[in-house]
Image (spheres, rainbow, N blue to C red):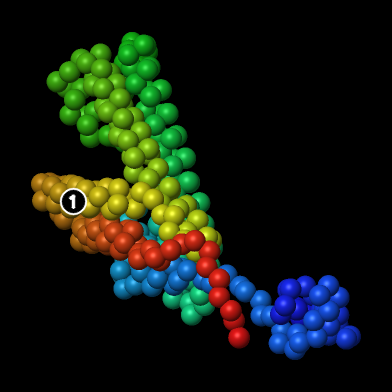
Amino acid sequence: MEFCTNCGQPLDPVTRTCPVCGGTNADVPVQYQAPARSGFTPALKKRIGSGIMLALCILATISVVLSFFSKSTFSVSYFNVNFDILGILTAIAFWIVYAAARSPEYEMSIGGLKFTSVIITIIKVIFWIGFGVFVVIAILCFAAPSAVSSAITVTPDSPDVLDELIPYFSNSAVVTLIGVACIFGAILFLIANIFFYGNISKSVKSIIASVEADQHRMVKLGTVSVWLIVLGILSVLVSFGSHIYAEKEIDILAVAADLVSAAMLFLGAALAKKVKDTPVPSSQAPQYTNYQ
């Protein structure tokens, strides 16, 4: 549709004259003014699709391969092969996010980011269940120690800690220690769920919101980066101690898996910092321009 250059009203499509002011010199159509893109999404894609993310994808894949030969917390076994379900899902999500970030289009598909958010939610639910189990066991240990004490028996499949504790402590003392350990475990699960996975969840959702709005709306990435560095250092220290002071022969695959996990934590911290520092356009208010 053409518009009058004098008063801006629509022209008669047949006579090409203005029915309001009668103007007849409206031979030049008024161009539509469309909102200009801020340029934030391409800048964000460039950082998400960097070499750090590619390295994370490769390490996540290596971690899945290593999990085939060593059983982890969230793995299941079929035909004597272990499958780390969450590890496999995480690797798939990483590759989807990387592919979306490397796409040539201006926009970025958020399917991989939403998939990652779902995985984090699943982990949070698992941790809340673990927190609840620890709390229930701790309550039983302190509220009904005799019942718990009578239930403690050492079998060939019992944890080594029971074999070591029972000869030196009475059953009531062991129950107390179990209760204290469960309280400590519940606190760790609570801290991890609220301050670690909670912040990761918020940061991923904020990235999704930023992509959808083409504006910087990201939060908690700095906090996540610090957490990942701390966990990476702790992972290295725990792995070093457990393998160096282990009485049995060192498991090379287990060492490799620990190193890969630590490397992923450090790379994740670097990626979070890199994404956090994505340049913000000088003005994120809607801008308008003419398109020829």
199 vs 282, nearest the viewer:
282
Toward which corner of the image does residue 14 lie, by quadrant? Answer: bottom right
Query: Does the rendering let one see residue 195?
Result: yes
Q: Amino acid at mark 1?
A: Ile
Toward which corner of the image does residue 147 lie, by quadrant? Answer: top left
Picture coordinates of residue 107, whole percent (x, y): 52, 71
Picture coordinates of residue 234, whole percent (x, y): 19, 47
Q: Which residue is mark 1?
A: 233
The kind of secondary structure element at disc 1 is helix
Q: Is residue 287 left or right of residue 133?
A: right
Examine the rendered structure and indicate whether residue 147 appears above or below residue 278.
above
Examine the rendered structure and indicate whether residue 77 appears above or below residue 155.
below
Q: Is residue 75 left or right of residue 258?
A: right
Q: Quadrant of the N terminus?
A: bottom right
Examine the rendered structure and indicate whether residue 165 appears above or below residue 72.
above
User: Which residue is found at the position 41% from the left and 54% from the top?
Assistant: 218
Query: Does the rendering let one see residue 86?
Result: no
Q: Is residue 251 left or right of residue 279?
A: left
Picture coordinates of residue 101, whole percent (x, y): 44, 71
Picture coordinates of residue 236, whole percent (x, y): 18, 52
Label 1 CA crowd tier, 10 Å (few <14, some 14–19, many 20+): some
User: Which residue is found at the position 50% from the left and 56% from the top?
Assistant: 209
User: Which residue is found at the position 55% from the left and 71% from the top?
Assistant: 288
175 vs 288, nearest the viewer:
288
User: Which residue is found at the position 20% from the left and 22% from the top?
Assistant: 166
Toward which corner of the image does residue 146 lie, by quadrant? Answer: top left
